[in-house]
Image: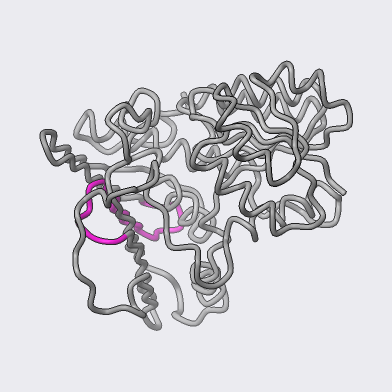
Amino acid sequence: MIHLALLGAGFMGRVHANAYAALPAIQVVAVVNGDSAAAQGVAGPFGARTYPDLESMLAGEPYLDVVDCCLPTPLHRRMVETVATHGRHVICEKPMALTYEDGRAMIDCCRQAGVHLLMGQVLRFFPGYQRIVAAVREGRIGTPVTCTLLRQGFYPAGRRSWFRDDSQSGGVLLDMMIHDYDWALQLFGPAQRVYAKLVHHTGERLFTQGTVTIRHHSGVITQATGTWGHPGPFTTACEIAGTGGLLRFHSDDANPLRMLTPPQPPGAEAVPLPDLSVGEDPFRLELAHFMEVIAGRAAPLVEPEQSLDALVVALAALQSAASGRAITLEEVVA
């Protein structure tokens, strides 16, 4: 039995809690959140204890194995380093950090402490995307040449949401599209340079769209588009062209005709998320895999350095959108 504490009782904290409820080898023993009612709401079904802050939780839980950080991105480094120095393994939601320096420090701290840092790049655990990876690696379309990726959903909920502050979230180019950067890097290899454009419309209807072109050292060109403010359901798509064929995936394929909805549906959660009610929950698959890693029965499918590589692409995209020129990866980490 693995004893786990959950940092955060917001949207992603509840998503992770729902996944843990289906994993019998995990005992959620503590939930940390400044809002005691929110913490109790997540902790109650597990019979877990609640704490107002990380330090009091670590002092009160001597038999803890792992801490799962589902807090806003600016808090990641401090939380990860504190947990690691107490000798506990760490699960951390994406994106890793807002700067290369913070991401590098998180990795180094966990390595020095001898604990796992397991990053929540959940797109790797979506069955549809896993099938695409398998088909490409089996040579079903020959040598890959280009990849087009799409990710779009409503604008993050709540006028005071930290997601809407680019200084805290990194905006759509970092917070949302980092899923696609990580996925493309694992399939096509390291990025050489990045060019990005960003459109942001304010007013009654908020709309942000980023388009990012990545040239990989392998020669493959990836173009990713991410949208906050899409007037329909959460949608993802992928098309990979190779020397021997074409692979296509679209999350709406089973529902070719849909009525468009308002940009932010009534009662929407904090951020857009695919419908997890049908098929295998990728968050459950991801967290079950992390438990196998912690138990020593599996090697991590996502190394922390790979999550840092995706962050570097995101930072290059931000620099490119601001400067209007292509950015090499060396410029970001120099």
**Residue at the image position 33 percent from the left and 59 percent from the top:** 234
Depth check, front residue: 320 or 87 = 87
Residue 2 coordinates in the image, percent (x, y):
83, 45
Residue sticking out furthest to the left: 203
Residue 9 location (% of width, % of height):
56, 35
How did the renderer colour the structure? Answer: one colour
In this rendering, the answer to whether 229 lies above or below 334 is: below
Q: Position of residue 182 (x, y in %)?
A: 49, 50
- Relative to the observer, which residue lies in front, 6 or 132? 6
* Foreground residue among 74 and 177: 74
Q: Which residues are magenta?
A: 215-233
Residue 97, image x and y in percent? 51, 29
The total of numbered circles placed on residues is: 0
User: Residue at position x 39%, y 31% from top?
Assistant: 169
**Residue 13 highlighted magenta (yes or no):** no
Quarter-wise, where is residue 286 in the image?
A: bottom right
Tell whether position 226 is magenta: yes
Q: Quadrant of residue 282?
A: bottom right
At horizontal 44% and vertical 32% (from top left) the residue drawn is: 330
Task: State left or right for residue 330 relative to residue 208.
Answer: right
Quadrant for residue 103, please give it. Answer: top right
Q: Image point 32% across, 39% down: which residue?
A: 157
